[in-house]
Image (cartoon, rainbow, N blue to C red):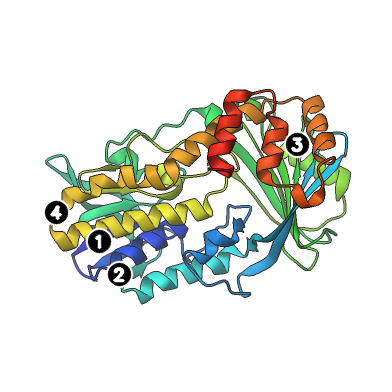
Amino acid sequence: MKNDYDIIVVGAGPAGSMAARFAAEHGVSVLMLEKDRDVGYPVRCGEAISKTGVEEFITPDNKWITATIIKFSLNSPDGTEAVIEFEDAGYVLERRIFDYELAKTAASAGAEILTRTYVDGLLIEEGKVCGVKYEFRGEQKELRAKIVIGADGVESRVGRWAGLKTFTDFRDMECCAQVTASNINVDDSTLYFYFGENYAPGGYFWVFPKGKNIANIGLGVSGMVGKKRSALSFLNNFMNNNYPQAPVLTSIAGGVPSTITLEKISAPGIMLAGDAARQVNPLSGGGIASGMIGGSIAGRIAGEAVKMNKLGHILTYDREWHNRLGKRHEIFERLKNGIYNFDDNKFNKIAHSFNKVPKDKRTLGRLFTTALINQPALLVDIAKVFVI
């Protein structure tokens, strides 16, 4: 290892790996630091992603695809199921392998990777971030860099150390719990979503198949709900009622920032990407694809800045992200606030009405229109996302 790099990326998740890869493709020196022993561990994710979200960055490979999804099943509180069929909708991943493969693309582009590296501070001079402090094998070390990219997840400290406002109101922090269980007999081509007070008030419950009768089963509820009743209690209730004998292979819990992107995601010497920048889709809580997009933009701009010797170029990152996905996420935030406050009766009516739509005309846009038919302002947002 050298004592200084052009760019240091903190965190080797999808956002970090894409930041490292797209920066290294500019021929600059890049080091990616990961606190855990292995890239891809631990997995804290429902693991579903759109086909387009994958193909923008890596060729699909069955070694990390556990299920190919062509249908969404929406289940209302009274048990009504409405199904939307797609062509090539998406995948359920094996994130342990997927993340590892993404990191390999960064390495192939020229990035160095160091695991079991705990970043515990930043080097800051004259108001500019110029490196990191970290612990490696019991020793405290420092590395200098022209640019540091923080892709260190929802609990990101890098941004906070740099003086960026990373606070997220607890009402916008989804409380999530999930198990991966076996002996789950579901259609491997379908993602199942459940709505209502008994499933996930202020959020949704999911069952995502992973093939061979294995599925990720979990939910996310708003911080307001989680303050009164834990997400885990809803999960346990669902498992007891539906799969009481299912062996649980893994169990995870955590927070997902279901809100719009931070007001600032760059400053002199520092950029944030992925969950650290709050680049999660506020409506779905999905962050794999959007994190890779954010990381790729950050990495490319950082690489350009070093090559041009104009480090101030990184401040264009905020605008580029906003134009690519940030504006869309603001719309999703409004849709989220309109939908997740529905009561059980409203969800039942939506499912009943949607089932009257011919199957070949069922789309997500049509579903949202059905749900928000009496909210004209949100219908405009739907048009912006699904039509324009």
Across and down, in percent, residue 293 comes to 43, 55
* Mark 3 element type: loop
Across and down, in percent, residue 200 comes to 72, 35
- Residue found at x 64% / y 68%: 65
Q: Is there any visible trace of residue 257 in the rendered image?
A: no
Residue identified by numbered label 4:
310
Marks 4 and 1 sit apart, C-alpha to C-alpha, by: 10 Å
Residue identified by numbered label 2:
25
Q: Amino acid at mark 1?
A: Gly
Residue 290 located left or right of residue 81 = left
Rendered image quadrant of residue 303: bottom left
Marks 4 and 3 sit apart, C-alpha to C-alpha, by: 50 Å
Residue identified by numbered label 1:
303
* Mark 2 element type: loop
Residue identified by numbered label 3:
195
Across and down, in percent, residue 107 comes to 37, 73
Question: Badges 2 and 3: C-beta atoms under 8 Å apart?
Answer: no
Q: Identify which residue, 180 or 310, lies in the foreground.
A: 310
* Mark 4 element type: loop
Question: Badges 1 and 2: C-beta atoms under 8 Å apart?
Answer: yes
Tell me which numbered mark, 4 or 3, is placed earlier along the sequence: 3
Q: Is there any visible trace of residue 291 in the rendered image?
A: yes
- Residue found at x 57% / y 37%: 383
Number of labels in the image equals 4
Crowding around mark 2 (Cα neighbors within 10 Å: few <14, some 14 to 19, many 20+) is some
Tell me which numbered mark, 4 or 2, is placed earlier along the sequence: 2
Question: Badges 4 and 2: C-beta atoms under 8 Å apart?
Answer: no
Against 25, is 118 above or below? above
Against 386, is 21 above or below? below
